[in-house]
Amino acid sequence: MTSQSRCSEVIQATASEVLGGARRDDSCVIQTVTRSEEALRAVTNWLLSAARDPLRAVQEWDMDGMTVVQCGALFCAIRLPVLLVEAMASPRSVPVMVDAFLAEVLEGGPVIRCNTGRFFYALVEPSAADRWHVRGTECLGRGYDLGVPSLDLTEHPGYTASYWAVPVREPGVLCEVVAVEQFLLHGRHLLALEEEQPDV
């Protein structure tokens, strides 16, 4: 069984428990649950609690690799332009290297990459939206929805809208707001310097 299949199986099993689904067949219950599976169950529970319809969310994860959850209760999401992030990571412009760069500078806080909108979304504490003040950027809080990829999409897939550039490690472990703010401001400064450089 592949790791992706195992991940999907754990998500489905966790969803059944969360939703109080059908009775479990003890013959199918996996007796030994590894720490990674326990962590996956915990993160699945956490994200599903932000969905309007948890059952539908699981189905969408399974069918489309993506579902929508509400911002503001568990986390807010700060938009990071892909062009800015790639400029900061330069010359490490290959997606896997950009993702590793983000994981380093944001200290492992969870980040989603949306390929269609050309943004990264750094997940931060729920109160961040009330005090976010970086001009020209947006922190999505209450009243906003966020597309969240399936937890097994952790590499640039090339065929889906989004993936976890930096996966969720455990429930409630988020990016530090100050770190995201400093990252954005420094990135803008670098881009401004590049624009000022005369063409050779």
Image: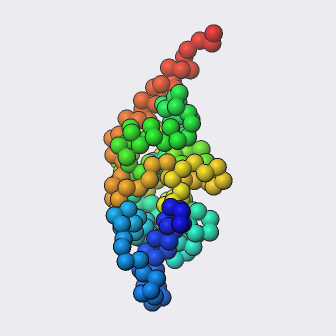
* Position above or below: 96 against 7: above
Residue at the spot 41% in from the left edge and 56% down from the top edge:
168
* Position above or below: 19 against 97: below
Q: Is residue 5 visible?
A: yes
Q: Nearer the viewer, residue 86 or 192?
A: 86
Q: Nearer the viewer, residue 75 or 46?
A: 46
In-image side of 65 versus 133 (left or right): right
- Colouring mode (rainbow / by chain / secondary structure / one colour): rainbow
Residue at the spot 62% in from the left edge and 65% down from the top edge:
64
* Position above or below: 123 against 20: above
Residue at the spot 64% in from the left edge and 49% down from the top edge:
158
Task: From the top left corner, tell me how far across and down residue 40 is, in percent.
Answer: 41, 64
The residue furthest right is 159
Q: Is residue 68 visible?
A: no
Task: From the top left corner, tell me how far across and down residue 166 is, in percent.
Answer: 45, 49
Task: From the top left corner, tell me how far across and down residue 51 is, in percent.
Answer: 48, 69
